[in-house]
């Protein structure tokens, strides 16, 4: 899928997190090709699926605070052995530099962005107009 | 037979502190990660499956060792608690252990073994219990022996705790000396005690004194003296007239000119004394003082040359840019986002646009091949904020081992020296190339390197 | 997600099957054995295919319900993908993790016996 874009627009509801996740998994399998049965390929696919699941869940969790119906847009792009996904939402601005939760306090949340940062190679956040865009990439 | 390798974070905390770039279980001993020695030993002892247990993260170890198919064994990973006894570890891994004999190697210690011994027969005939111990480490066997011990069988081994930089240095030097006869070590060489990795470039006047072990992608420049007892990692440059003796040079390290490294461990920009445990930031005479001293004298002509060349490029590509940029921008193929990058001066940052061009379609392909995605940055060269060619600009706020805080030289450029060479343009090896050129290039060679970088990018983009 | 519950003496064995994410996490959080502070639960994750941070939060949440944070929730049989989520976040440090459910139950029984 060199140089082709896949764009998916989903309602910002928890129910659709699985569609986002499964699409991520399928896209990752597509670019991995025959390596998807190898350990490295499986790890790549799981990491990508996990990151998209976290980003989508994050968008949905914060979308519920706003009254208007909202959508989350996912764009997948593959170039030079790099699989990139951007997640757009219209929520309030935020930062991806969240602190690492302190395990000693038995935290129940705050792990989402940490997981994204750990499993992806590059993660950037930007604000364009009223939109948040998290862009994440992982190299094969 | 199965093997459990168990570690606790507290045992190797010193490695995190002294060598933060490497996972302690991957700490290189004679250019081979520590954990591989243990895996080799488990195989010699007849194991078909090995499980690595740890109370800390194993992510990097897993990425390196994967599922063990490289060694023809099943490799798996699991978590333990810091206070788990051997009994508790066996309980937590009951399915893995099954009914078989299990060898448990616990503690961050080095096993002195000899691949010529028949450990397999020995292990299968030993009574259960402790086999060998050292402070902080032990080898234990469970289950009943399947064979009787033959009288003639000798299978010696001993454990050596790796509890400090001193013992690590000792273990490394010992491994280098005993070499291939006892362990399986990486590298090739026609002579004993002399192992070379792939892509090692040795200038004619370099002197090699055995024993040495040299990794992959290493450049040894004129009149350098390597050894005796030198362990040099991968992606290393040893510059002119420098000597490395009784020392370990870690991966991704650049040793500048006229340096004497004797009885030291060099890692990134740190020079460690294994005896005292002291570590100092390497005051590389060429890179640091050289560049600092000459900055005002040298930087002006360099800046002028860079600015002039940038102006020429701006003029030459003005027409393709003015046609393609609006076209791509309107079509949504040109995505630009602001980001904060580290500036040349320490502790300063500068805003730069990150441009992504979706290379679908002819216009985008041409734009990318002509490096038009870097067009706006050329103006920063004219204003003196960026070099035309230098280091890859690093994003601010990212903590990474090759960050300017850890390396002696950084000069963000529109193009990077790594792009001029045919080295991967990311990762530690690229940083080494960049540092080498920062030390050696002058305004004129810079022009040549810009052209090379441009051609490399052109070929790379136009072949996809 | 599917939750099946069995018991072994005083220990509840809760098996989770499928995916543990934002959609299914509330079901685990509301499970009767999970919210009972005195009940020791072995969570059998053998058939858990996928878990994200919300699912992880629910498992830590289950532990937070317990009077005994050391063995109130014991985990067994997680696959490598699930284990990676525990490890990335360091949450593995909060749990005793077994590769065999029977061994996990034995451990929980012994600990509980020693405590009472």
Image (spheres, grey):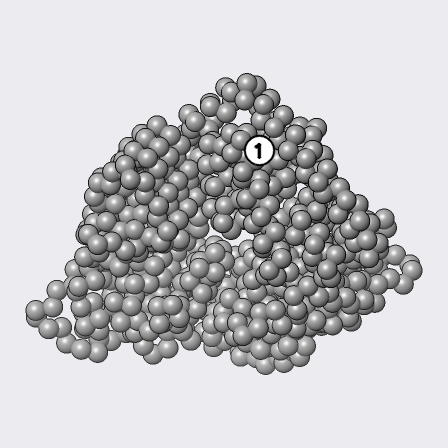
Q: Is residue B22 left or right of residue C4?
A: left
**Which sits in the foreground, B361 or A128?**
B361
> What residue is shown at x 73% (from left), y 56% (from top)?
B364
Q: Is residue B3 left or right of residue B58?
A: left
**Which sits in the foreground, B294 or C97?**
B294
The residue that mark 1 highlights is: B411
Mark 1 surroundings: few (<14), some (14-19) or many (≥20) residues within 10 A: many
Rendered location of residue B304, percent (x, y):
63, 25
Q: Secondary structure at mark 1?
A: loop
Residue A60 appears in which quarter of the rendering? bottom right
Badge 1 sits on which subunit? B
**Which sits in the foreground, C62 or B79?**
B79
Q: Does residue B204 lie above or below C61 as drawn? A: above
Q: Is residue C28 visible?
A: no
Q: Does residue B444 lie above or below A94 as drawn? A: above
Q: Is residue B71 left or right of residue B64?
A: left
Rendered location of residue B114, percent (x, y):
19, 59
Rendered location of residue B247, percent (x, y):
29, 38
Q: Is residue B128 left or right of residue A36?
A: left
Rendered location of residue C92, percent (x, y):
53, 60
Q: What is the number of callouts on the image? A: 1
Q: Is residue B268 visible?
A: yes
> What residue is shown at x 80% (from left), y 56% (from top)?
B332
Q: Does residue A102 lie above or below A23 as drawn? A: above
> What residue is shown at x 51% (from left), y 51% (from top)?
B424
């Amino acid at each position: 899928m060199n140089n082709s874009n896949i764009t998916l627009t989903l309602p910002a509801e928890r129910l659709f997190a699985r569609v986002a996740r499964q699409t991520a998994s399928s896209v990752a399998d597509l670019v991995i090709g025959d390596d998807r049965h190898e350990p490295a390929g499986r790890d790549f696919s799981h990491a990508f699926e996990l990151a998209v699941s976290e980003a989508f869940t994050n968008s949905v969790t914060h979308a519920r605070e706003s009254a208007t119906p909202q959508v989350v847009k996912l764009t997948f792009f593959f170039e030079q052995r790099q699989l990139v996904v951007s997640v757009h939402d219209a929520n309030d601005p935020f930062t991806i530099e969240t602190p690492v939760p302190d395990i000693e306090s038995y935290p129940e949340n705050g792990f989402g962005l940490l997981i994204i940062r750990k499993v992806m190679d590059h993660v950037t956040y930007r604000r364009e107009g009223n939109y948040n865009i998290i862009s994440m990439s992982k190299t094969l | 037979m199965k093997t459990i390798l168990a570690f606790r974070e507290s045992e190797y905390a010193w490695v995190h502190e002294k060598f933060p770039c490497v996972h302690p279980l991957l700490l290189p001993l004679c250019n081979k990660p520590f954990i591989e020695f243990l895996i080799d030993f488990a195989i010699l002892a007849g194991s078909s499956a090995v499980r690595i247990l740890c109370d800390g993260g194993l992510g990097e170890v897993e990425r390196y060792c994967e599922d063990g198919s490289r060694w023809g064994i099943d490799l798996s990973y699991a978590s333990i608690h810091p206070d788990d006894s051997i009994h508790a570890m066996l309980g937590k891994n009951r399915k893995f252990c099954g009914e078989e004999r299990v060898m448990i190697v616990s503690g961050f210690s080095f096993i002195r073994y000899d691949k010529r011994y028949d450990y397999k027969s020995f292990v299968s005939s030993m009574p259960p219990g402790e086999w060998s111990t050292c402070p902080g480490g032990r080898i234990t066997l469970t289950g009943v022996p399947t064979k009787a011990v033959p009288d003639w069988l000798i299978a010696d081994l001993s454990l050596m705790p790796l509890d400090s930089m001193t013992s690590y240095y000792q273990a490394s030097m010992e491994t280098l000396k005993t070499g291939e006869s006892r362990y399986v070590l990486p590298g090739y060489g026609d002579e004993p005690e002399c192992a070379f990795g792939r892509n090692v470039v040795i200038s004619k006047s370099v002197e090699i004194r055995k024993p040495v072990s040299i990794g992959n992608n290493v450049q040894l420049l004129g009149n350098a003296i390597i050894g005796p007892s030198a362990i040099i990692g991968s992606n290393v440059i040893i510059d002119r007239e420098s000597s490395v003796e009784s020392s370990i040079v870690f991966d991704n390290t650049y040793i500048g000119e006229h340096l004497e490294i004797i009885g030291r461990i060099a890692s990134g920009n740190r020079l460690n004394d294994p005896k005292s445990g002291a570590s100092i930031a390497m005051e590389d005479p060429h890179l640091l003082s050289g560049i600092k001293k000459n900055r005002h004298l040298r930087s002006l002509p360099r800046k002028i040359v860079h600015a002039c060349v940038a102006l020429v490029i701006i003029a030459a590509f003005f027409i393709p840019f003015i046609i393609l940029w609006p076209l791509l921008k309107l079509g949504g193929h040109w995505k630009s986002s602001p980001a904060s990058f580290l500036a040349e001066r320490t502790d300063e940052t500068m805003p730069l646009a990150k441009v992504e061009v979706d290379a679908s379609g002819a216009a985008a392909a041409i734009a990318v091949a002509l490096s038009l995605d870097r067009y706006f940055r050329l103006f920063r060269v004219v204003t003196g904020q960026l070099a035309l060619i230098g280091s890859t600009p690093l994003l601010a706020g990212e903590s990474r081992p090759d960050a300017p805080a850890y390396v002696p030289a950084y000069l963000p450029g529109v193009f990077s020296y790594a792009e001029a060479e045919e080295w991967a343009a990311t990762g530690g090896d690229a940083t080494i190339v960049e540092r080498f050129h920062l030390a050696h290039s002058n305004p004129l060679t810079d022009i040549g390197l810009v052209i090379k970088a441009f051609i490399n990018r052109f070929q790379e983009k136009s072949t996809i | 997600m599917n939750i099946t519950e069995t018991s072994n003496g005083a220990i509840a064995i809760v098996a989770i099957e499928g995916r543990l994410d934002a959609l299914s996490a509330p079901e685990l959080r509301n499970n009767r054995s999970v919210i009972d502070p005195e009940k020791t639960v072995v969570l059998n994750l053998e058939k858990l295919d996928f878990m994200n941070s919300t699912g992880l939060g629910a498992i830590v949440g289950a532990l937070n319900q317990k009077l005994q944070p050391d063995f109130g929730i014991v985990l067994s049989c997680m696959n490598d993908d699930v284990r990676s989520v525990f490890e990335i976040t360091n949450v593995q440090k909060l749990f005793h993790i077994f590769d065999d459910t029977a061994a996990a139950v034995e451990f929980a029984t012994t600990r509980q016996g020693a405590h009472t």
